[in-house]
Image (tube, helix red, strand yellow):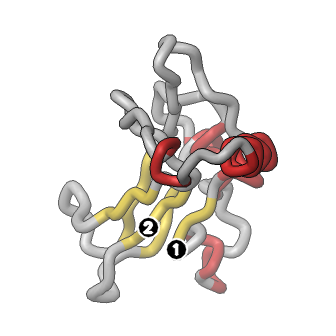
Amino acid sequence: IRDAIARVKAHNAAGGSHTDIMNYETPLLPTAYVFKIEILSTQGDPHYVGLNGITLYDANNEQIPLTANNVQAVPRDVTVLVECSKDPRTLPKLIDGWNRGTDDQHMWLAPFGSGKPNFIYL
């Protein structure tokens, strides 16, 4: 941003118009600060929704590293329920890299069915 502001100031100081530098290129691939995944239904379970992982890739097919600071969900996971507070299927499991299999230690589960969709933010 600072570089862009400096270029505009230099351009204006040289007698240019701000409309002379308004050109931009629309990206071909998605670019964003936040991806929002909206979960509207399950595969039949009326009370819970789950995933075994999420992986993001860039334009060069390189995996984008994600950390616990990069992921959030609403509701966060099944541990928001008092009776499930010790359940291992927590939000960090979405990005632990173990995306194949049926091991609960590497899955995410969240309550579903309150009439509102669930959200995952990356």
- Give SS at disc 2: strand
- Other residues around mark 1 within 10 Å, as few (<14) / some (14–19) / many (≥20): few
Choose between 111 and 15: the one closer to the eye.
15
User: Percent x, y for residue 17?
Assistant: 54, 51
First in sequence: mark 2 vs mark 1: 1
What is the distance, in whole Å, between disc 2 and disc 1 at their CAs?
Answer: 5 Å
Mark carried by residue 13: none
Question: Which residue: 68% across, 50% down?
Answer: 12
Residue type at tag 2: Phe
User: Percent x, y for residue 67?
Assistant: 75, 43
Mark carried by residue 74: 1
Q: Is residue 107 above or below residue 116?
A: above
Q: Is residue 19 above or below residue 58?
A: below
Residue 46 in sight? yes
User: Percent x, y for residue 28?
Assistant: 34, 28
Question: Which residue: 41% across, 33% down?
Answer: 25
- CB atoms of marks 2 and 1 within 8 Å: yes
Pointer 2: what residue?
119
Residue 1 in sight? no
- Give SS at disc 1: strand
Question: Which residue: 25% across, 73% down?
Answer: 46
**In this rendering, would 117 be left or right of 64?**
left
Question: Which residue: 80% across, 48% down?
Answer: 2
**In this rendering, would 111 be left or right of 95?**
left
User: Percent x, y for residue 85?
Assistant: 70, 74
Q: Is residue 47 above or below residue 49?
A: below
> Residue 118 falls in which quadrant of the image?
bottom left
**In this rendering, would 1 be left or right of 74?**
right
Choose between 109 and 97: the one closer to the eye.
97
Residue type at tag 1: Val
Q: In the image as oriented, which residue stretches furthest toward the front?
A: 15
